[in-house]
Image (tube, rainbow, N blue to C red):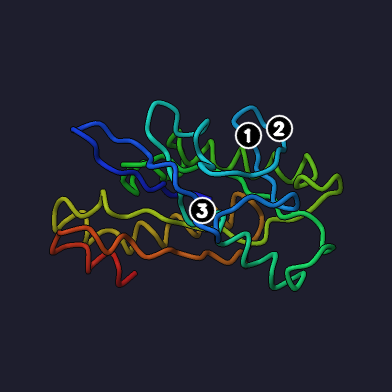
Amino acid sequence: MAGRGGVIANHHIKLWDGIVPQECESHPAILRLSADLRWEEAAEPLHADIDAGKACGVGPGMPFANSVRDRLCGGGGGGGAIGLVPCAVGGTAIGEWARGEPLYENMVRRAKESVRSGGGGGTAEIIKCLLWYQGESDTSTERDAGAYWGNMEKLIHNVREDLCLPDLPVIQVTSSVHVVNSLISIIRVV
């Protein structure tokens, strides 16, 4: 999971309002890989120890995991664990996620460690998808917005290559509808 979490503005200080919608609630079958590479029950904010120093809030990770769990298990027990690997850092541009950059290398390292350590379920698992939520920082200039598609294609290619998963699905979450910027529509087309 790479992306960012929701925050609210409060006198120029960004604070999470602490509200956890029902679709974001924790479940014992949904785990997260912590910053120190330990599996633990996932809870919002998922990225609190990853995007340290910033206010992290609710993002797309828990609703996604709960939806997958409901589809696989019919909302009941069984079906095994779902492991989330938070890697997001808010306010970053896609160029900061290029191969060789610290954010990209950390994401790949954490993804590989999640497989090595058993995906949280105690047995070797595989990565099922990359959930990507990023793009607003690439709407500052028309040049940045116009380069987004090519940069996103390169990111997907590199992640698939570095994880040896040529068919890895990438689910891209639409950038916030609350952004007032004429260039956001270019990013949303991707």
For the residues labelled 2 and 1, say whether their Cβ atoms are less than 8 Å apart. Answer: yes
Q: Position of residue 162 (x, y in %)?
A: 60, 49
Please give the label number shown on residue 38.
2
**Which one is in front in this view, the residue at disc 1 or the one at disc 3?**
1
Please give the label number shown on residue 34.
1
Decide which of tag 1 and tag 3 comes sooner along the chain: 1
Q: Residue at x 38, y 40 (%)?
A: 16
Find the distance from the CA under tag 1 to the CA under tag 3.
24 Å
Secondary structure of the residue carrying numbered label 3 = helix
The residue under label 3 is 158
Residue nearer the viewer, 139 or 149:
139
Look at label 3 and name its amino acid. Asn
Find the distance from the CA under tag 2 to the CA under tag 3.
26 Å
Q: Residue at x 21, y 58 (%)?
A: 179
**Which one is in front in this view, the residue at disc 2 or the one at disc 3?**
2
For the residues labelled 1 and 3, say whether their Cβ atoms are less than 8 Å apart. Answer: no
Look at label 2 and name its amino acid. Arg
Relative placement, left or right, of 116 versus 3 is right
Find the distance from the CA under tag 2 to the CA under tag 1.
5 Å
Residue nearer the viewer, 153 or 76:
76
Residue 66 is drawn in which quadrant?
A: bottom right
Q: Residue at x 24, y 36 (%)?
A: 10
